[in-house]
Image (cartoon, helix red, strand yellow):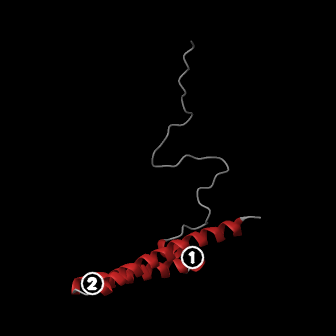
Amino acid sequence: MATPSPVTPETPFEPPKPPVIEGFSPSVYSNPEGFKEKFLRKTRENPMVPIGCLGTAAALSYGLYCFHRGHSQRSQLMMRTRIAAQGFTVAAILLGLAASAMKSRP
């Protein structure tokens, strides 16, 4: 059985630098997009997701406040509202994904 010869790279690998691949550009955008720009772009693409997130957070916060104050009926109602808001958010994410998939098709 023949033993394979060791492969020696032409240039040594330097961890801080990414490898250079011919015809490959690691960034699609000419300037890197910051967190704020990306957040605003994604919000414009699908505005229902942040609305659902805010509704979920509001229902959770108010439900915990009511629980702390001893209003168990209202706390239960807010926890159910939170579940509905989470469902709305997940549905908005899925519909946004479906819409972007349909838009990218030829």
In the rendered image, which residue does mark 1 sit on?
Answer: 41
| Gap between marks 2 and 1 measured at Cα | 40 Å
Please tell me whether residue 88 is drawn above or below residue 8 in the rendered image: below
* Residue at 54% in and 29% down: 8
Pinpoint residue 86: horizontal percent, then vertical percent: 45, 75
In the drawing, what numbered circle is on residue 72?
2
Amino acid at pointer 1? Arg
* Residue at 64% in and 52% down: 24
In the rendered image, the residue lying farthest to the right is 106
Which of label 2 and label 1 is nearer to you?
2
Dot 1: few (<14), some (14–19), or many (≥20) neighbours within 10 Å?
few
Q: Nearer the viewer, residue 45 or 17?
A: 45
In the rendered image, the residue lying farthest to the top is 1
Amino acid at pointer 2? Ser
* Residue at 55% in and 20% down: 5
Using the rendered view, name the quadrant where residue 93 is placed. bottom right
